[in-house]
Amino acid sequence: MEKIGGYWKPIILYHLSTGDKRYSELKRAIPAVTEKMLIQHLKQLENDGLVIRTAKPVVPPHVTYNLSESGKGLIPVIQAMAEWAFKEMEGEYK
């Protein structure tokens, strides 16, 4: 649970569950996260083996993030958490 705990990690994993993303795409998809937090959590997720960072040696640098096999195994859990959160939010606005 430590690997996916916290506020931002499940949100980052949710967005990566739809496919490869560049840093700027993640930042646009999660505008409330600060650059520092996004970078920090991406590094932690990479170190925990849930995210793969791929850098292509071009100018400007082209870096993408995607889920590892271990990270892909979490997709059902992340989707269930997202569905629960959306239902809870609906209840608050009725």
Image: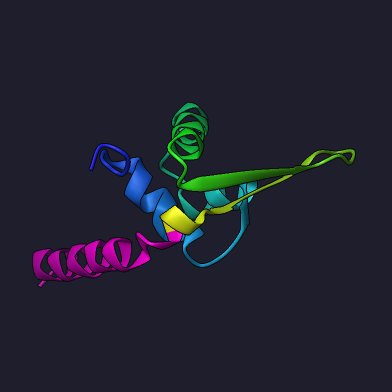
Image coordinates of residue 2 in percent, x first then y, are: 25, 37
Q: Which of 9 and 73 is in front in this view?
A: 73
79 horizontally vs 21: left or right: left
Q: Say if residue 45 shows up in the picture.
A: yes
| Count of numbered circles in the view | 0
Which residue corresponds to the image point at 48% horizontal and 36% vertical from the top-left? Answer: 38
Q: Nearer the viewer, residue 68 or 44?
A: 68
Which residue corresponds to the image point at 13% horizontal and 65% vertical from the top-left? Answer: 88
Q: Say if residue 23 shows up in the picture.
A: no
Image coordinates of residue 12 in percent, x first then y, are: 43, 49
Predominant SS of the magenta segment = helix
Residue found at the far right of this picture: 59
Query: Is 1 above or below relative to 73?
Result: above
The C terminus, quarter of image: bottom left
Is residue 24 in the magenta section?
no
Which residue range is magenta in the image?
Answer: 72-94
Q: Nearer the viewer, residue 32 or 23?
A: 23
Image coordinates of residue 71 in percent, x first then y, are: 43, 54
Q: Which of 18 and 93 is in front in this view?
A: 18
